[in-house]
Amino acid sequence: MEIKLHANATTTPRVRRYLQQSDKSDRELAKELGISVTTVRRWRNRQQIEDRHTTPRVVHKAMRSEQVVLINALRDTLNAPLDELLILVNEGLGIPVSRATLNRYLAPAHQRQKAAAQGKKALKAGVQPTTLTVHYRLLSMTMDDGGDHHLLWAREPVSGWCQARVCSGISLALMQNWLSEVLEHCPADIQCIETEKVKWLQVELEGRVRRDLPSGELSTIAFSESLNTLIPAASEPDALVQRLCELWNTGKAQKKLGELTPQAFLEALRHQD
């Protein structure tokens, strides 16, 4: 009969049974068998004589590849620290993963672009929250989700404050109205708007300078499966991105912002002025 023992085992099943049936003291048994008192007590307190399984009782399933891409894109867009990203993934997207599991699926640091200084470091370097960066992506979604959609998001780089919108149709008028609403709700005194070279973003707002962001290839975000399959908390796409922005802006305080949320950080600066 083959006996499988743990690699570091100091006893056999026969010795363990002897320990459980013996009337001798722990110290007497330890001296007799040449093992520690701790080992004697461990096996005397157990009912079985087999080694316990070392694999976790709860094994987290691997995330789908599209979920991994989505989470990495979310992390890079917001420059989100791990703990803040974990809240967005668990509460915002409804994907139940542990901190360790999430960290395992994030792209290594050397594969990411180095982010500019944020929060207190940015202020110390003389950078003020007066610029808003505006971005656009085409979302190629399944027919179950209504086909192609358009993602717009605006971000204040110093605090990370963000607003987003997903719409089924797009026009310059819609873009201008949405951007006006963003500026109305942003706690910062925005003086300059930086946009990508996309026809939907070529808007002019009175009293604010507009500049083009450094040119780069704009990629389409394609989904081969429905949102409900990839994102358990998904409802309507626009409601999803707005919930994520709210959770990010007012959810968890961040160390780099002086233990404030992005919303509170900008509001505190405005009150100082």
Image (spheres, rainbow, N blue to C red):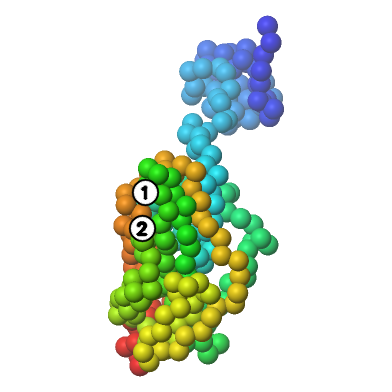
Give the secondary structure at mark 2.
Answer: loop
Marking on residue 168:
2
Query: x, y percentage for residue 209?
Result: 45, 89
Give the secondary structure at mark 1.
Answer: loop
The amino acid type found where label 1 is placed reads Gly
Q: Is residue 184 above or below residue 163?
A: below
* Circle 2 residues within 10 Å: few <14, some 14–19, many ≥20: few
Q: Is residue 122 above or below residue 66?
A: below
Q: CB of mark 1 within 8 Å of CB of mark 2?
A: yes
Which quadrant of the rendered structure holds the C terminus?
bottom left
Residue that badge 1 annotates: 146
Which quadrant of the rendered structure holds the N terminus?
top right
Residue at the top extreme, as displayed? 1
Q: Residue at x 56, y 31 (%)?
A: 55
Q: Is residue 231 visible?
A: no
Query: x, y percentage for residue 72?
Result: 54, 56
